Image: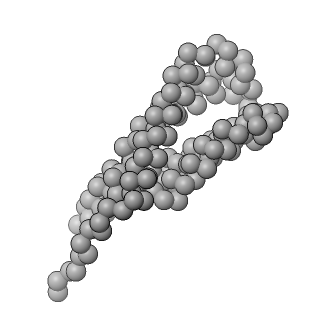
Amino acid sequence: MSRITPSPAPTSAADKALLFLRLFVGALLFTEAITKSQQYPWLEQEYPTILGIEGAAIVTIVGILEVVAGVLLSVGLLTRATAALMAVAMFTAAFFLFPHQTFAQGELKFVYAGIYVTLAIGGGGRYALDEILLPVLRSARRT
C-alpha cells in the first residue's frame, strides 16, 4: 500500500511574517539581556525578593532566560514552548514582580506578552528549525 504525501505548501505571507516576528523579538531579547548586564548593580536593587529569591538572582535568571529564549526563537527551535514560557514570564513580571507600576509603566511587558502569545499559537512558521527537525524526530520514533 503506497503512502500519499502532500506536496509542500507554497510559502505564505504568514510564514514570512512569523520569520520576521521571531527574528525581531530575538534581537530585542538580546538587547534586553545586554542592557541588564550593563545595569546589573542598579537592577539588583530594583528587583524585589520573591519566594525567598533575592533580586540579584532574579535579574541573573531573567538575563539568562532572555539570551536562551532569544536564540531559540530566532532559529525557530521549540518555538511554541519558548514563547509560552516567555509569555508567562511577562505576565509574572507585570503582576507579581512589579505590581506597583502603572499600566503605562508596564505597558511594554504586555506588548511582549502579546507577541509571545502570538508565537505560541502560530508556531515558528515554515522557516523554523521546528519544521525541519520535528518531522525527522517523529519518523525516527516510529522506526
Q: How is the image coloured?
A: one colour
**Residue 61 visible to the viewer:** yes
Q: Which residue does the image show at 60% across and 43% down from the upper left?
A: 112
50 versus 79 height, above or below? above
Residue 51 image offset from top left, x and y in percent = 73, 33
Q: Which residue is most to the top?
A: 41
Measured as percent of width and height from the top left, residue 86 is found at: 57, 43
Q: Quadrant of residue 59?
A: top right
Q: Quadrant location of the N terminus?
A: bottom left
Residue 43, compared with residue 65, is above or below; it is above
What's the residue at 66%, 39% (across, down)? 109
Can residue 96 be seen in this snapshot? no
Which residue is at the far front? Answer: 13
The quadrant of the picture occupied by the C terminus is: bottom left
| 34 vs 99: above or below | above
Q: Residue at x 63, y 44 (%)?
A: 111
Q: Give percent across and percent down for residue 105.
A: 75, 33
Q: At 51% across and 53% down in the image, what residue appears?
A: 119
Residue 85 vertical position relative to residue 98 in the rendered view, above or below: below
In this view of the protein, which residue sits in the foreground, 1 or 100? 100
Q: Position of residue 75 (x, y in %)?
A: 36, 43
For the residue pair 88 and 1, the one nearer the viewer reads as: 88
